[in-house]
Amino acid sequence: MKRAVLLAILDTMLPGDDGESPLPRASEAGLDLAKLERLAAPVAAGLGGVDAFLLAAPADRVAKLRIVELNAAPAFKALLAEALASYYESPPVLAALGWRAAPPQPHGHALAPDDAGILGALEKVRSRGRLWRT
Amino acid sequence: MASGRQVRCDPVDVAIVGAGLGGAAFAWRLASRAPHLHIVCFERGDWLDRTDLPAQKPDWQRLALGSWATSPNLRLQAGGNGVSADYPIDDSGSEFKPLMWNGVGGSTINWAAHFPRLHPSDFRTRTLDGVGDDWPFSYSDLEPYYDLNDEMFGVAGIAGDPAYPPKRSRRMQPLPLGRGGAKAARAFDELGWHWWPVDAAINTVAEGARQACNYCGPCQQGCATGAKSSTDLTYWPRALAHGVDLRTNCIVQEIVLEGGLAKGIRYRDGEGRACWQPASTVVVAGNGIGTARLLLASGLPSPALGRNLMFHPAAYVRGMFAEELDGPVGPVGCALYSHEFYETDETRGFKRGIHLQVTRENPLLVQALRLEPGWGAEAQRLLREEFRHSMAVLVLAEDLPEPHNRVTLTGATEADGLPGVRVEYALSREARRALDFGLARAEEMLRAAGAHRIVRVPLAPYTGWHLLGTARMGSDPTTSVTNATGCCHDAPNLIVVDGSLFPTVGACNPGATIGALALKMADALLGEKP
């Protein structure tokens, strides 16, 4: 399969956005393409011609992929799962979403302590008296 | 019976199957009160290595969906993880998919550590509401064991919740509610509804080698810091110090029954050898599926065995907010809960109640995978809108015991040498009404909190943590498997000490009750009181 076809499929699935901190397109997110290429082969085969897919406008590419999603659901699902996993663990994507690339440990995350007012509101709950039955 | 080719072990007083919550609590209590007893525990899996958990790895999100998923079936499909000795479960006939861990610590390894107790009314559903069955003892009978189990686990929380009888002060301050929790608390207040910070079996201060929680998020793939309590950190070190012999990587094949008594167990050790362990008493704690599977495979004749499986049906609602919230930061299951609708009010159209639980969010990848549509520009727009801007409210309902919801054996023999196991479970109309009521209340709270968009998930299949009721206590051998002390009607020296015992399940997480029950059963075996 041509690399251009794989990238076109992935960019149709994950086109990115142009927000304040833009999400990159899949082809610009530094994904490991080797595994994706293998999974994309049966999806590409269902497109009804890869050259036409490459020449199609973005909306038409979406329509063509939707047809494959219906007709070759297991293959499409496998590719999508791998594409999403690769994309959403990619450092540039995480950075665009305001999230760090490093794993949760050893640093953990910060969680602000509760303000006194919130826990003080428990007095109101307490004041309702017993809610349990015997 | 043992053949000449088997490894024959020296007889023991007590052989326990399963080193999870029930098995660990039982082993510790028995060993600490009766040090003269020779106690051995067989665990099919291994000890957890906390230096090698997904939370420390760049691909942790992917691992959480594969070899470290909460579902044993998904872990097996991904090739397993070498610690949890999983077996396949045919769950094609069940609306909820069983989740568990099969190693030392059992499902406390990957639980959320939300640690509520049942209410006193949960022990008397037949008397109070005319449904289900009463437990053979009351909340007050179990209360000393709840307290002891709390002490062993270490609970972070705040005493004084009016939804419960008074509890002792909690050892540690509660986990922070976070931005989402605080927003929910204000909304509950505005509505005049009950809310309370959860009791969590999670350290908020360091204790010994166990750190305080640093809010990393993926509790359900094992806790790297040891802040989250699991029985490999709580009960087991103390049980081992009392001389309990814990044998890992040993898969029990059969409890040998003769003349209405358990004679011992046949097991396969870590080297694949067939072994025979004679025992005066056999104790089973393999959870509501594993226990039923083993007892069925062993030929225990009880007609109620495997029946009345209960999960706690679950659904959830998530709300999207303009303001930034915490996202997947903090212990996923532990923020706050509301028991405003926990007790029966028949004007709602159903008996029994619901538990509303404000949770933390899932990892980014899980959030991406749950979207509809699942790909394209709209999916990415939705993810932008949700990530760090969403709040999820879990609705748990009480499912009542129904004999057709059950665990059975398949005709196959699995790789672990045991018969295959199948789970059949259909949501009752009553439970559906309760879930719908709860979803509506959760949505009401989220709207009051300012959510601008709501997504309802009417049923959450991958929430099958609570595996309960399949070897229930009772006095009638035709409708129950054990008596009030966990002893099987058909083999009095065969004792069950896990969630299988629950005659009914209330509407909240069962961990605290399983631990308390196991402690109570240990005392019952010794003829002692707390």
Image: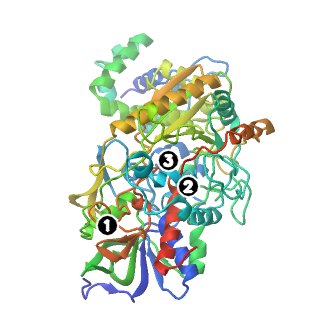
Which chain's residue wears label 3? B
- Picture residue at 57% right of the left edge, 35% below the top: A90
Q: Quadrant of the C terminus of chain B?
A: bottom right
Closer to the camera: disc 2 or disc 3? Answer: 2
Q: Amino acid at mark 1?
A: Leu
Q: How is the image coloured?
A: rainbow
- What is the quadrant of residue B350 in the picture? top left
Is A66 placed left or right of B397 in the picture?
left
Label 2, on which residue? B222
Tag 1–tag 2 contact (CB < 8 Å): no
Q: x and y percent of residue B129 in the render? A: 42, 45
Q: Residues within 10 Å of mark 2 (few under 14, many from 20)?
A: many
Marks 2 and 3, how far apart at CA = 12 Å
Residue B270 visible in image: no
Q: Amino acid at mark 3?
A: Leu
**Above or below A5: residue B140:** below
Which chain's residue wears label 2? B
Label 3, on which residue? B63
- Picture residue at 71% right of the left edge, 57% below the top: B169
**Tags 1 and 2 on a common chain:** yes
The numbered mark, 3 or 1, whose residue comes first in the sequence reads: 3
Q: Amino acid at mark 2?
A: Gly
Q: x and y percent of residue B12 in the render? A: 42, 86
The numbered mark, 1 or 2, whose residue comes first in the sequence reads: 2
**Tags 2 and 3 on a common chain:** yes
Secondary structure beneath label 1: helix
The numbered mark, 2 or 3, whose residue comes first in the sequence reads: 3
Q: Quadrant of the N terminus of chain B?
A: bottom left
**Tags 3 and 1 on a common chain:** yes
- Picture residue at 37% right of the left edge, 37% below the top: B430
Task: State the residue in front, B388 or B454.
Answer: B454
Instruction: In the rendered structure, find residue B294 and report the number of the disc placed on it.
Output: 1
